[in-house]
Image (cartoon, rainbow, N blue to C red):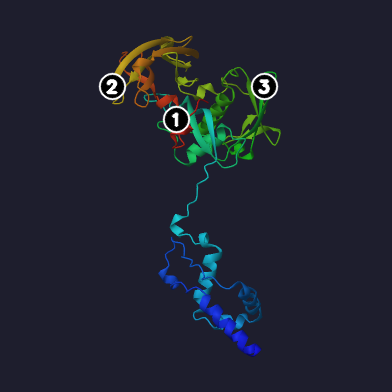
């Protein structure tokens, strides 16, 4: 037998031992692995010769098979059968960012108020802020709440989304607060400017810092022109600086439950320093009313405190109303604000129950 005849005989034997080709690609579902048939045993002495022949004449081998596409499909399936994945099984996990929790000073407009000034109310929130913002603070959280519409009713915000607190430092009785340049533009109106300043001042001086004065700076420089009227803020300002631009009753501490009672505290300027508190149920019916004596009133600002039995309140349904009776007739409610009590005292604005923790 000639050398050519030996090669031809060897190729015929190799072809006979080759597994049958798989079905056409359109018959193979994307969710199943291709079935690999094991080749029949071959003689040991022919193995080396087969390899030599395969390397020497690959064109003859390929030419001896029909349907080159089938060969390619079989090869890719054998090499990586797990790389074929149905597109509908591919999912992308959304990036939430980091969770910020704490007190945020917002405001609401009181009912039956001749001043028509906003009432500050601090609320406890848990909110997702933007991805990667490891130095997130209340201005980031408040901006996110405003941006995605999750600011709970009836609360509002006057601090523009672009305004940020960059850093703070305390020197004696002065709290220096570096703001970004967007702060200089104010909030778009004189009353909005004052409300914005009051929100920031009360926010920055809460939890034991109430007596500090705040010095706002931008690019490390004192501010001589702020907002709509070019207000001079080059000197430190405090909680009492813009108090005349607030409602006659507002809240300075979050209304939360502790040791079986809800604690309510704030500032007021009511007739004879008297104001009233009501507990409303989910339908708005009055379930409790009590009077509160503030430290001052009748033209002078004072502070007030009250406690409400926790058994009177159903979190997620009840609300606490603060108001005073009109001195004219004594039966009309004026300067009314109503603060809803959320579940666990926290406004969870993340949409994830597990995100609620004790800030």
User: Pointer 3 and pointer 1: residues touching (CB < 8 Å)?
Assistant: no
> Spatial distance from mark 1 to mark 2, Cα to Cα?
23 Å
The 10 Å Cα crowd at callout 1, few under 14, some 14 to 19, many 20 or more, is many
Residue at horizontal 58 percent and vertical 84 percent from the top: 9
Q: Is residue 53 above or below residue 124?
A: below
User: How many numbered dots are placed on residues in this image?
Assistant: 3
C-alpha gap between disc 3 and disc 1: 31 Å
- Residue shown at the point (50%, 51%) measured from the top left: 92
Q: Which residue is mark 2?
A: 285
State which mark lies toward you, 3 or 1: 1
Residue 198 falls in image quadrant: top right
274 on left or right of 238? left
* First of labels 1, 2 by sequence position: 2
Q: Which mark is residue 347?
A: 1
Q: Which is more foreground, mark 2 or mark 3?
A: 2
Residue 40 coordinates in the image, percent (x, y): 51, 71
Structural crowding at the residue carrying mark 3, measured as other residues with C-alpha within 10 Å and reported as few (<14), some (14–19) or many (≥20): some
- Vertical placement of residue 291 versus 155, above or below: above
- Percent of width and height locating residue 272: 42, 9
Q: Position of residue 308 (x, y in %)?
A: 39, 14
Q: CA distance from mark 2 to mark 3?
A: 45 Å
The residue where tag 3 is placed is: 174
The outermost residue toward the bottom is 2
Provide the secondary structure element on which disc 2 rests: loop
Q: Is residue 156 visible?
A: no
Residue 252 rendering spot, x and y as whole percentages = 50, 20
In the picture shown, does residue 42 fall above or below 251? Answer: below
Secondary element at image label 1: strand
Q: Name the secondary structure under disc 3.
A: strand
């Amino acid at each position: 037998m000639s050398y050519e005849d030996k090669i031809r005989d060897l190729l015929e034997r190799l072809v006979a031992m080759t597994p049958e080709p798989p079905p056409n690609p359109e018959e193979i579902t994307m969710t199943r692995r291709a079935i690999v048939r094991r080749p029949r045993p071959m003689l040991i002495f022919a193995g080396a010769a087969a390899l030599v022949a395969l390397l020497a004449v690959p064109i003859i081998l390929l030419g001896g098979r029909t349907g080159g596409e089938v060969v390619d499909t079989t090869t890719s399936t054998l090499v990586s059968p797990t790389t074929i994945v149905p597109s509908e099984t591919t999912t992308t996990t959304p990036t939430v960012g980091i969770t910020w929790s704490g007190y945020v000073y917002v405001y609401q407009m009181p009912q039956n108020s001749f001043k028509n000034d906003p009432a500050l109310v601090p609320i406890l929130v848990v909110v997702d802020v933007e991805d990667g913002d490891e130095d997130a603070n209340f201005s980031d959280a408040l901006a996110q709440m405003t941006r995605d519409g999750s600011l709970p009713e009836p609360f509002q915000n006057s601090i523009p989304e672009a305004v940020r607190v960059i850093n703070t430092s305390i020197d004696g009785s002065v709290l220096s607060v570096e703001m970004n340049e967007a702060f200089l533009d104010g909030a778009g109106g004189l009353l909005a400017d004052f409300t914005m300043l009051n929100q920031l001042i009360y926010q920055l001086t809460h939890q034991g810092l109430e007596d500090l004065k705040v010095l706002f700076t931008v690019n490390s420089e004192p501010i001589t022109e702020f907002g709509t009227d070019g207000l001079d803020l080059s000197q430190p300002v405090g909680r009492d600086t813009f108090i005349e631009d607030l409602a006659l009753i507002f809240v300075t501490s979050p209304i939360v439950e502790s040791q079986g009672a809800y604690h309510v505290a704030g500032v007021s300027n009511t007739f004879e320093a008297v104001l009233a508190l009501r507990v409303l149920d989910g339908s708005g019916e009055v379930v409790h009313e009590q009077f509160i004596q503030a430290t001052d009133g009748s033209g002078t600002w004072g502070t007030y405190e009250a406690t409400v039995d926790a058994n009177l309140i159903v979190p997620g349904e009840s609300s606490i109303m603060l108001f005073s009776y009109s001195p004219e007739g004594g039966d009309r409610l004026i300067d009314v604000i109503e603060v809803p009590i959320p579940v666990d005292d926290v406004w969870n604005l993340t949409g994830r129950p597990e995100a609620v923790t004790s800030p």
